[in-house]
Amino acid sequence: MLKQIEGSLAVAETVGLCRPQVVAAYPISPQTHIVEALSDLVRTGELDRCEYLMVESEFAAMSACIGASAMGARAYTATASQGLLFMAEALFNASGLGLPIVMTVANRAIGAPINIWNDHSDAMAMRDSGWIQLYASSNQEAVDLHVQAFRLAERLSLPVMVCMDGFVLTHAVERVDVPDQASVDEFLPAYEPRQVLDPAHPVSIGAMVGPEAFTEVKYLMHARQMEALDEIPRIATAFEAAFGRSAGGLARSYRAEDAETVVVALGSQVGAIEVVVDELRASGEAVGLVDVTCFRPWPSDEIRRMLAAARRVVVIERAFAVGAGGIVGQNTRLALAGTPTVVYDVVAGLGGRPVTTSAIREVLLDAMSDRLEEGRLHFLGLLSDLVDAQLRRDAASVPGPHAEAMLRDVGIVGSGTL
């Protein structure tokens, strides 16, 4: 059904249609509206036979999901930013135990300094936790990915996080086609767990494993993740057949088949990049886009195929590895190993800074004119004067935290002596 609806509420309605049996909830912006809406669905009886748990922390939320899933229940939670990091130990437990938990991550920056706005540093920090990571480029895709995520998680017995940009998507009100209950029931079978804890037949899970088998355990975790590279496209194809629209998959090529310059990106910035691609195509430039939906497992073969014609690739990402460089950029280089294609790393939109079409256009023109430096981390819209002023203070050994000093430079906080 087409609705004019906030992204968070559309996701909550869709998760409810997937009939979770346990929802563990702890509020943190910008995902709070999701678990609030689910609580209303449980309270009113629209989502029945569901245990709604109000826990005391994000760590408790994931721990409750682990217990519920191990007992054979379809389990769900949502979080963001520091909440995701607070779950870190439990995230590894969920994947190590092969539990098909689904979680929404409303992507938000990691502090300090505190920032509640969007970037991808939270999910990227957990990229090696063993969870499948799917990134939505729109609220419609966020809805569609959640339906697919439950089927994927339960098909492979692996946890799946669906990432949607905080505020940019979660709080945006737009037209979304929310599926009906009958269609979801037909697409998503009733949950039949692979493992169930039964008091009548007690077993231990997550027990100690020494050197004699730990490598093999980790190998099997990797092998099952790699199975997802085949399963995700199959589920996306089945979803299109059932619902009449394309969503999900590993990655999507947009006018990239014959493009010499291709942007690789994920998340909500994809829409702005498509606009720039169309503008540059209209002016005769061979430019395209690869929109990555599945970041973990990394679809190297698919990315390599989609970038086959590219002379240069500009990776625009909303997080980076401090002291190393681009995260998605390094994965893209892995996919292109042995090819002459040049890859540029561009960081954009940190802490909610807008990724504008004019800035995207400028960086693409720089790349096409060979004005970008390969191997260097480029920051879109970096305020160099602000950085230089702080570097001068550092050189003069002026004490004080960087963030507060730079805020004073731009007049955001009260003046003071540092």
Image: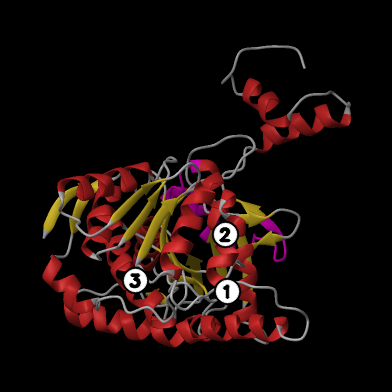
Residue underneath mark 1:
204
Marks 1 and 2 close (CB-CB < 8 Å): no
Determine the image quadrant of residue 100.
bottom left
The residue lying furthest to the front in this view is: 200
Foreground mark, 2 or 3, reads 2
What is the span of residues highlighted in magenta in the rendered image? 352-377
Residue at x-position 29% and y-position 63%: 20
Q: Which mark is residue 90?
A: 2
Q: CA distance from mark 2 to mark 3?
A: 19 Å
Inspect the image, locate mark 1, and give the three-letter code of the amino acid beneath it.
Ser
Quarter of the rendering occupied by the N terminus: bottom left
Looking at the image, residue 280 lies above or below residue 204 = above
Q: Is residue 353 left or right of residue 150?
A: right
Residue underneath mark 3:
150
Q: Which mark is residue 276?
A: none
Q: Tell which of 300 and 339 is nearer to you.
A: 300
Inspect the magenta stretch and tell me whether residue 358 lies in it: yes
Q: Is residue 262 left or right of residue 186?
A: right
Q: Tell which of 190 and 413 is nearer to you.
A: 190
Inspect the image, locate mark 3, and give the three-letter code of the amino acid beneath it.
Phe
Res 169 seen here: no
The kind of secondary structure element at disc 2 is: helix
Check disc 1: other Cα within 10 Å, few if <14, some if 14-19, many if 20+: few
Inspect the magenta stretch and tell me whether residue 10 lies in it: no
Foreground mark, 1 or 2, reads 1
Check disc 2: other Cα within 10 Å, few if <14, some if 14-19, many if 20+: many
The kind of secondary structure element at disc 3 is: helix
Residue at x-position 15% and y-position 46%: 44
Residue at x-position 59% and y-position 65%: 92
